[in-house]
């Protein structure tokens, strides 16, 4: 199938499901789109739609999901998210965010990995420990896309919104680095020593941060010397695409680089290098790009059910993974917040809200699909999909009432 045909189908489906959700379902956009695509995928599996199901599977097979997201859409989504984060607000929450996005992700990786290894053994499903750790890494990053709209509509305090946004932006990059380190170990390309693993992690993470500062500063320099919103929007596009691609070629963390560059342009660049007209056009452009790409992403997530292995024991493993992941999320959130309580105040109900707001999304699906084809990957794909669907639908729909109940009492 031609690339243009695939893009046409995905955008048409996204538009149709968006209209249906706006007119009928009236759910948060991300949840409504994914549910629409998921329902269509299930209907296509009925015997009377055998031909259409085969064509849909053929289309999905021609889309490299992990390449499309990790090496394409992610750069735009992260930049658009970082562009509207206030650095002053982020700085006030820096300790909570940095601990959750680093130690929280690493700790969750090993706790989830160990727990799933024991669970798979109990279910007589053969999955090696390193693949269980890979699952822990890919399921640890939280997805801000489906959460932020819900938090705003629920009237969540700004400090809480900043914690969730900041953690989600940075833990994507950290989790990808952890996943790549573990993948290198699994494939035998990295010697398993504390020094080698630490060096690889530091190079990727800190290198991405420094590279983001450099590319963001270059873009800032260029923006400050022109006053044409067309040119300035094009410069930000070049920063996102060129900066992400260059970071990947240099084996640095491209997600961290783009988040840092987005924060720099969204704060110093917006304040010192743009006219009011440029700010208005830049915001409109990136908000629209963010909405369109998010719509396509959640439609893709819903359609992916067509290519997973539907087996009873795999589905059971996915269902059992849900409470395990929620318990680990509770531990990784409650420990740092409890330790920081003597030094700062927190929003009422911050621990249960942050625990329940840890939605999983496209990053997790893309990372599991990047693993080499094998029976172990099939297991992890099914488990990941079950967890992602549960978190987006069940946690997403109940998060608003939970926030209102705990913060407005």
Image (cartoon, rainbow, N blue to C red):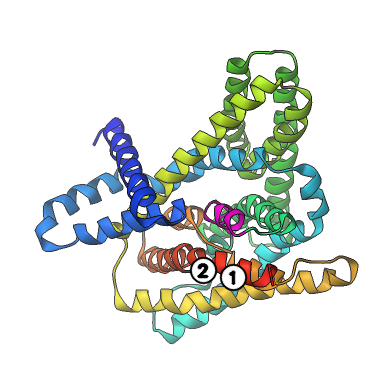
Q: Residue furthest front?
A: 409
| Foreground of the two, 399 or 329 | 399
Report if the CB atoms under discs 2 and 1 are less than 8 Å apart: yes
Q: Position of residue 368 (x, y in %)?
A: 45, 58
The magenta span reads 141-154
Q: What quarter of the picture does the C terminus occupy?
A: bottom right
Our reading of the magenta stretch's main secondary structure is helix
Q: Which mark is residue 398?
A: 2
The structure residue drawn at horizontal position 69% and vertical position 35%, both measured from the top left corner, is 261
Question: Is residue 56 magenta-colored?
Answer: no
In this orientation, which residue lies closer to the viewer: 311 or 234? 234
Please give the label number shown on residue 176: none
Residue found 50% across the figure and 34% down from its top: 288
Q: Residue furthest left?
A: 48
Q: Which residue is mark 1?
A: 402
Q: Position of residue 406 (x, y in %)?
A: 66, 72
Q: Position of residue 375 (x, y in %)?
A: 35, 66
In this image, 139 relative to 14: left or right?
Answer: right
Q: Quadrant of the N terminus?
A: top left
């Amino acid at each position: 199938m031609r690339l243009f045909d695939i893009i046409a189908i995905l955008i048409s489906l996204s538009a149709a499901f968006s209209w249906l959700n706006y007119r009928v379902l009236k759910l948060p956009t991300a949840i409504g789109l994914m549910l629409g695509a998921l329902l269509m995928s299930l209907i296509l599996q009925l015997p009377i739609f055998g031909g259409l199901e085969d064509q849909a599977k053929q289309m999905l097979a021609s889309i490299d999901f992990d390449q499309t997201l990790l090496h394409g859409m992610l750069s735009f989504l992260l930049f658009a998210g970082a562009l509207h984060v206030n650095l002053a607000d982020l700085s006030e929450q820096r300790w909570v965010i940095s601990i959750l996005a680093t130690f929280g992700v690493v700790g969750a990786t090993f706790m989830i990995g160990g727990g799933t290894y024991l669970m798979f053994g109990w279910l007589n499903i053969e999955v090696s420990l390193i693949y269980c750790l890979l699952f822990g890494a890919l399921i640890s990053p939280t997805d801000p896309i489906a959460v932020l709209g819900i938090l705003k509509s629920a009237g969540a305090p700004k400090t809480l919104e900043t914690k969730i946004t900041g953690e989600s932006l940075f833990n994507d990059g950290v989790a990808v680095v952890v996943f790549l380190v573990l993948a290198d170990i699994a494939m035998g390309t990295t010697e398993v020593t504390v020094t080698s693993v630490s060096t690889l992690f530091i190079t990727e993470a800190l290198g991405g941060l420094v590279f983001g500062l450099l590319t963001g500063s270059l873009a800032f320099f260029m923006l400050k010397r022109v006053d044409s919103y067309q040119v300035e929007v094009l410069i930000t596009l070049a920063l996102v695409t060129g900066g992400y691609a260059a970071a990947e070629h240099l084996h640095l963390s491209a997600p961290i680089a783009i988040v840092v560059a987005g924060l720099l342009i969204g704060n110093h660049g917006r304040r010192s290098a743009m006219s009011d007209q440029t700010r208005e056009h830049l915001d409109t452009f990136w908000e629209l790009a963010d909405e369109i790409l998010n719509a396509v992403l959640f439609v893709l997530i819903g359609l992916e059910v067509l290519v997973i292995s539907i087996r009873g024991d795999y589905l059971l493993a996915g269902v059992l993974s849900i409470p395990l992941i929620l318990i680990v999320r509770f531990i990784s959130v409650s420990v740092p917040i409890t330790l920081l309580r003597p030094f700062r105040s927190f929003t009422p109900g911050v621990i249960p809200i942050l625990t329940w707001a840890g939605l999983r999304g496209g990053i997790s699906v893309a990372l599991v699909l990047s693993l080499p084809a094998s029976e172990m990957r099939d297991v992890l794909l099914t488990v990941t999909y079950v967890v992602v669907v549960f978190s987006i639908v069940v946690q997403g729909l109940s998060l608003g009432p939970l926030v209102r109940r705990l913060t407005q009492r």
